[in-house]
Amino acid sequence: MNLCTRIVATGALFALSPQTAYSQNAVVAAPPASDVAEAFRKLAPAVVRIEVRETGAVALSSVGSGFFAAPSGRIITNFHVISSLVNEPARHRGRATWGKDTVDIQVLAVDVVHDLAVLEAPDAHGEAMLTPVTASLSKGDRVLALGHPRDLGLSIVEGTYNGQVEHVLTPRLHFTGPLNPGMSGGPAVTPGGALVGVNVATMGEELAFLVPAEFVTRLLSRLPSTLPEPEALRNDMAAQIGTLGVDALESLFEADAPTVQLGPYRAPTEPSAAFQCWGDAREPKDASYRLVIHRCSTDESVYLSENLSAGLVHFSHQLLDGESMGRMRLLTASEQVFNDKLEFDGTPRETTSFRCTTSNVRTEKLAFRTELCARRLKTLYGLYEAVLRATPLGATTQSLVTTLTMSGMRFDLIQRMVTRYLASFVPAPEAK
Amino acid sequence: MSWIEVVDRAGRVIARRTAMGVPCTVGTAVDNTLVVEDPEVAPYHARIDREADGSLTVTVLGGSSGLHRPGAPERAMSLALTRSAAVAMGGSVIRIVDDATRDMPVAAATIEPMPDGWRAFVARRPVQWGSVAVLTVIGAGIGFFTLPGSERAVNALLWAVALLLFECAWVGAWALTGRIRHGRARFGQHFVVATVIALLGLLVGEMESWQQFLVPGATMIAVGLTGLTALIWVVALLGHMQVMNRANWHKHVRIAASFGIAVFILILAAREYRGQWSSDVEFSSVLKAWPERLVPAKNQEQFTASLKALQDQLDHDGEVAADAIEDDTSTD
């Protein structure tokens, strides 16, 4: 399960995406110390419940948390809590509730890369306001998280700070504590009440993640003076994701990137610390070849909507080892693996259909049969999803089929990644 | 008075008619003028006509074993029937006799003996067995040389059997229809039509694969190949209908053409439906065609240009739907 899935489970209406694993999260924290009770009393007025309703069905679309972190009634929450207000504004309405007060909310600014949003609630005047922590924290420091777990009312949980998470595209803080769906967007604070981060995701078993408070500060520093149109927000999101792609992915598959030997080829593996790779080998039923699989993927992605994400890069190599098959039969098997259908999420409103281009391509060391299929994200101008499938030509006893998937990226970046990806395949020394 | 008689393999007279009662038909079907019981005679095997000069001629109607002179191996589609020259079909003989000689048994030597052995068994149905052999070889070849399954021999056997079963079911259905509608089942001729159609179908299927490989996106070629597929269906239908009944040519052409047009439209409609919005990625590459020898590999510049063209297509797709999105997402 990647972080994207976890984020949805945490923030979106739990009735829509129940995660049975979360039942294990009902771990009671250590008995609250008197300072926890005191912190709750002080912080509760700053924390709000956020709901988004679908206007057609007049039903809840998502429930999450938020908090006042700026004057003039501005509320911080996760983008994934209120994403439908940006993606489908005509069909959704948002409201914030704290104490006995309820106000309508509108989206003022979004930091989609770090999963943050600032909401405008003109009629709201929070009785408390959180400010970011100034002192640096150490692993093991106590952190308190507030929110509305499963919409059961405002709660506070105690956990520990465990530093920055490794192997991620965007910075995250590791919080060891029982975050539950519905607490997304709520604040995580020191016992003294200073903001450490924003609740954003959980993997269960008290393994949870926060958006660092510095990104809240950055977002608040670039607020527009007037309420933007949803289209302007989406254009801003597309620009943010485009920048993320360039920053985080531009250097992937460079000439000196690591490779792994698969049969007669060396193929790319673990191109950056943000990737994790797995391997497997098996003999498919009723097939006369052995299949070696090598998969690598970024462990997280940027949440765009229930169906779409950005910044996700996944690639896999499948080596068909069929020495006794004969070339014709090996190529038939390769053709079957090559033509395996891939299923993606998305709706006609969000994306175009995939279009493909097929060609033989020669790199410096090898020639490939390639098929690149791509689609455009309609609501986020300038972003695309693409899949490259390729196989080196001339296989006789071992055939390699590779697949590279890229989501939510500018097309020029996709072009460069595809080119570098193909160039990073070379014949293994033994095969020369 | 002269008589036309049919004598069986044992020399018994099994049917008789006056020589004046022509034209008449001979066969195993009960509505023939001269009904015979002989496994080698077709339901409507032959017709006897009187020529302008008064002589009699026997002509094949639907018997795949044809006609021959008793004791002579040469087959013919039409033979003269005289007092001195009988005509044989299968194991039966048609002869002309006078009152004085009627009911006399035919000399055993004049009847062609039933050949024995597997060669003779095959020789009696050369068309059917030839078709079976062709399909067996093709099915076994596909199974043995191309499929990546673990047991090559089993693959070959299964494919050959599958192809034969399909062929038999197809031919059987047509022959049964012929039997019901016209009282005759011409397995041999249906086998020929079905085999030719199967081979043409394989050829066009392969051409479609190569088209996707050599000239992907060439719409007119794809439509042309679809037309070829429809044409095969027309030929198949027309062929089988003509085998059943050679009359009604115009009616058969109309039926087959209508069916072909329907097939053509349905295939195009199915392709159009597949072209509708989908979140799936479907690949369709031909790898076993040694592509590197037929299609030159693009260099970096050419590859980038093809990706740019893909982007232009996607941008066009997005713009087509842009207005609808704006309407949908506009706020009050």
Image (cartoon, helix red, strand yellow):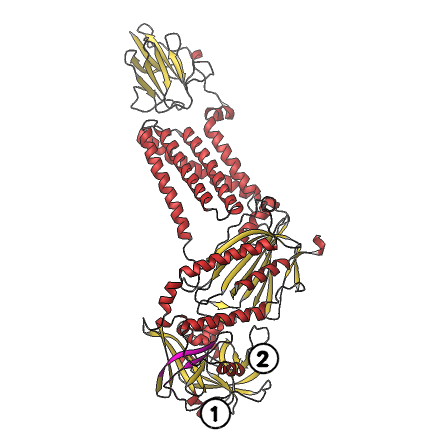
Mark 1 / mark 2, whichever is N-terminal: 1
CA neighbours of label 1 inside 10 A, class few (<14), some (14 to 19), many (20+): some
Report the chain holding disc 2.
A
Say if labels 1 and 2 share a chain: yes
CA neighbours of label 2 inside 10 A, class few (<14), some (14 to 19), many (20+): some
Q: Chain of mark 1?
A: A
Residue displayed at 30% across by 16% down = B23
At 42% from the left and 65% from the top, the residue drawn is A350
- Relative depth, front residue between A144 and A104: A104
Mark 1 highlights which residue?
Answer: A39
Instruction: Find numbered disc 2 in the image and state the secondary structure of the residue it sits on.
Output: strand
Q: Nearer the viewer, residue A286 or A356?
A: A356
Q: Which span is picked out in magenta? A: A103-129
Q: Position of residue A417 (x, y in %)?
A: 58, 62
Which disc, if any, is residue A165?
none
Q: Is residue A29 among the parts visible in the rendering?
A: no
Whole-number angstrom distance, CA of label 1 to CA of label 2: 24 Å
Is B57 within the magenta?
no
Front tag of 1 and 2: 2
- Left or right: residue A208 versus residue A46 is right
The answer to whether any part of residue A68 appears in the image is yes
Where's residue A365, x and y in %? 67, 54
Q: Which residue is mark 2?
A: A164
Q: Is residue B303 above or below residue B96?
A: below
- For badge 1, the amino acid type reads Ala
Query: Quick one: SS at disc 1?
Result: helix
Under mark 2, the amino acid is Gln
